[in-house]
Amino acid sequence: MTVKLVDIASIIRSKNAGPYELTLDIIFKDREWYEKIKKAKAINRSLICGLYNIPEEDILNIIEFDPAGAVKITIRRPLVSGDIGETDVYGAQQHAPLLALKFEL
Amino acid sequence: MKEIKVLSPTAILGYGFPVASFKAGLERRPDVIAVDAGSTDPGPYYLGAGVSFTDRRAVYRDLSLMLKAGRELKIPVIIGSAGGSGAEPHLQWNLDIIQEIAARENLSFRLAVIHGEIDKNIVLKAFAEGQIIRLPPGAPLTIEDISGSTHIVGQMGVEPFIHALEAGADVVLAGRSYDPAVFAALPVMRGFAPGLALHMGKILECAAIAAIPGSGSDCMMGYLRKDHFLLEPLNPARKCTVTSVAAHTLYEKSNPYILPGPGSIIDLTAARFDQYNETMVKVSGSRLSPCPFYAIKLEGAKRVGYRTISVAGARDPVFISRVDEIIAGVKSRVEDNFSDIPAADYTLLFHIYGKDGVMADLEPQKKITSHELGIIIEAVATSQELANTICSFARSTMLHYGYSGRVSTAGNLAFLYSPSDLKAGEVYRFSIHHLIKVSDPCALFPMEIIKIGEGQG
């Protein structure tokens, strides 16, 4: 079946993790969906590379965090927070592409 | 001692808290009131310029309540990362507020001031001796980064705070600090497990953000015991749930299992989150792993120029469809008109809201679907005058630019203000985000004791 991420996640957000990194958190509504996504490795490097159009080496981490039923993706910031030309000092509005994700589970 | 209670009134000193929540906290007889005042999130300007990102009156309000409560209950009040960035001007700014509160409220106490600004020569010497460690993906450090920084700070651990408390401080005001240190210092000093104390501090530093509904301007209490800690929001409208606390563990971190800090790593691989009662969560299993060496995180910022911006909008559909071509045309007109100015002396940027103003290169949607665009013309240059010149010329050129297919020949931009151009002043960038190895956790952070209000109260 096809599921939309927005239907199975309660929190989808982005934020700085220090001035050089951007971290994306997806916290699932319940354990069942989290386990399904985790088992299917549905959130993976190639998905994020494609979504943000970034090379694989810019993905620093994808971590499944069982205590919160969450998947965390950390990427290298294209520009350091506050650098000339940088557009989101807190990194708080870089999550939107995740909202369109759909999975075959 | 079986339990130690740590009251965290607010996520950032100056973000505020309801008095009712704070009173509820005081009724529970805390052993210490602690607050983290800092963050690098607001960007490099505040550290570089030596300015607080919080407002003086808001900080005065929060601190006034905290200092009075501390004196009433005879418990320490601990403030870390003074003035937001924790360099010397931020510390002095906060010290001035404390002195004003003490004078007005007739308070007397022993104040420990711990400095967090690190002398450039110390960093240069450590760099020459190979004692500086790069933190990827940050770039390797250079001598220019060190000598060009206007302020360099180090994130102190619990040790300087313990040193101050042992010296009999009633109030501790510290420069840049590792966020959990202000909450963990007294518990560690009294012999509680440092892994649990620091993990509790990691959550308390954001006050009620870890509750549901979350808030950065409401109080949270931590109860640290032998082998676990409890978290309790002090506003009855909020509760801590396993999910809200575990979710907060993810916040602003790249790896939620391994949290490196000064001298040690908080290891959460065996951490457990359990619902304790309806509003409280119990956390256990958080451990501390030692590091092979003790290192302090350094932060520095340096000035890279001066900024002028112009804010405008566009509603014409032909202009919107040609916006990339128009920007390229305006840039080339500016370069041509000021061909005597070296290209390295200025940067001209166009931020197009409604296109990719928020996400820039990360924006996956390339097609403009909006009927209007917000345009920020930005010039950053080696002087304010040059930034003004470039921004002004780019603005007038864009206003009257004759693009192909143009129908509206009177002007391309709707300006929001008169004057249309705003001087934004100095521009800084983060120049240092590296570790420095130290042999003594207190060596970089000199402390002095000031007797406040002696003989008055």
Image (cartoon, coloured by chain):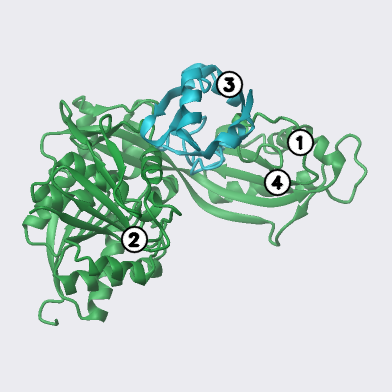
Chain colours: A cyan, B green
Q: Give coordinates of residue B439: x percent, y percent.
A: 11, 34
Of the residues shown, which amino acid type is indicated by label 1? Answer: Ile
Q: Earlier in the sequence, mark 1 or mark 2?
A: 2
Nearest the viewer among B145 and A93 is A93
Q: CA distance from mark 3 to mark 2?
A: 41 Å
Please tell me if label 1 and label 2 are on a single chain: yes
Of the residues shown, which amino acid type is indicated by label 2? Answer: Cys
Q: Please give the chain letter of the residue carrying mark 4.
A: B
Q: CA distance from mark 1 to mark 2?
A: 44 Å
Q: Residue at x 59, y 50 (%)?
A: B308
Q: Residue at x 12, y 46 (%)?
A: B192
Which quadrant, please, contains the N terminus of chain B? bottom left
With B430 as the anchor, is A54 left or right in this view? right
Query: Badge 4, how many Cα within 10 Å: few under 14, some, many 20+?
Result: many
Please tell me if label 3 and label 2 are on a single chain: no
Q: Secondary structure at mark 1?
A: loop
Marks 4 and 3 close (CB-CB < 8 Å)? no
Of the numbered discs in the image, which one, if any, rests on residue A105?
Answer: 3
Q: CA distance from mark 4 to mark 3?
A: 42 Å
Q: CA distance from mark 4 to mark 1?
A: 14 Å
Q: Earlier in the sequence, mark 4 or mark 2?
A: 2
The residue singled out by tag 1 in the image is B368
Nearest the viewer among B433 and B390 is B433
Of the numbered discs in the image, which one, if any, rests on residue B133?
Answer: none
